[in-house]
């Protein structure tokens, strides 16, 4: 009986240490391509960028869905959820269990732009915003720093 309680105690301690160790908890990253054109960005690079940026920002997400779509789809989301009747390059939603980042492939000139927009959306999930010039500059700088570290 003593051995069993000691084993259970160790298992509980191990479980707690795993739960409290953010490096052990990996974010599930799903990438969906809903736009008509061929995806110019590499999925492995996207996953690596997201994981590194989350670590750097100290943000944990259980799962993040990246949806690469076209301008009309993002414009529809922008109008429906933000009451803005205009195109946008990225929209992100923090939905508790799963966060989502929608990126317009039409607005991206190349893979670098797609990576930038994904990071931009990720920074929104990490608490950044761009309501003024200072915030906009800070967010832009953080995106560039994450891209340079890749």
Image (tube, rainbow, N blue to C red):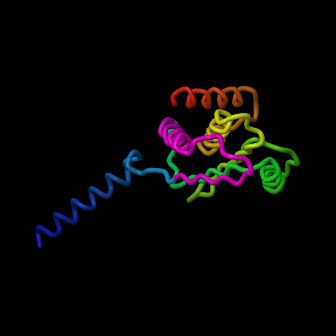
Asked if residue 141 lies left or right of residue 107, the reply is left
Magenta stretch, residue numbers: 29-56
Q: Position of residue 109 (x, y in %)?
A: 73, 34
Q: Is residue 52 above or below residue 22?
A: above
At 56% from the left and 59% from the top, the residue drawn is 97
Asked if residue 23 lies left or right of residue 31, the reply is left
Q: Position of residue 35 (x, y in %)?
A: 73, 51
Q: Is residue 104 above or below residue 73?
A: above
The answer to which of 92 and 58 lies nearer the viewer is 92
Q: Does the stretch in magenta take in 105?
A: no
Q: Position of residue 117 (x, y in %)?
A: 67, 38
Q: Position of residue 150 (x, y in %)?
A: 52, 31
At 75% from the left and 27% from the top, the residue drawn is 133
Which corner quadrant of the image does residue 107 belong to? top right
Q: Does the stretch in magenta take in 44?
A: yes
- Which residue is outermost to the bottom? 1
Asked if residue 126 lies left or right of residue 70, the reply is left
């Amino acid at each position: 009986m003593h051995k069993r309680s000691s084993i259970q105690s160790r298992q509980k301690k191990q479980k707690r240490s795993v739960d409290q160790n953010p490096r052990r908890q990996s974010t599930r990253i799903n990438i969906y391509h809903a736009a008509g054109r061929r995806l110019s960005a590499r999925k492995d690079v996207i996953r690596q960028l997201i994981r590194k940026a989350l670590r750097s920002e100290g943000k944990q997400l259980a799962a993040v869905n990246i949806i690469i779509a076209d301008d009309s789809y993002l414009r529809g989301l922008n109008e429906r959820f933000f009451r803005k009747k205009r195109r946008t390059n990225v929209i992100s939603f923090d939905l508790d269990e799963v966060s989502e980042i929608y990126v317009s492939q039409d607005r991206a000139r190349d893979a670098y732009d797609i990576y930038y927009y994904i990071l931009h959306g990720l920074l929104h999930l990490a608490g950044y915003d761009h309501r003024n010039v200072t915030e906009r500059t800070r967010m832009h700088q953080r995106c560039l720093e994450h891209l340079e570290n890749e």
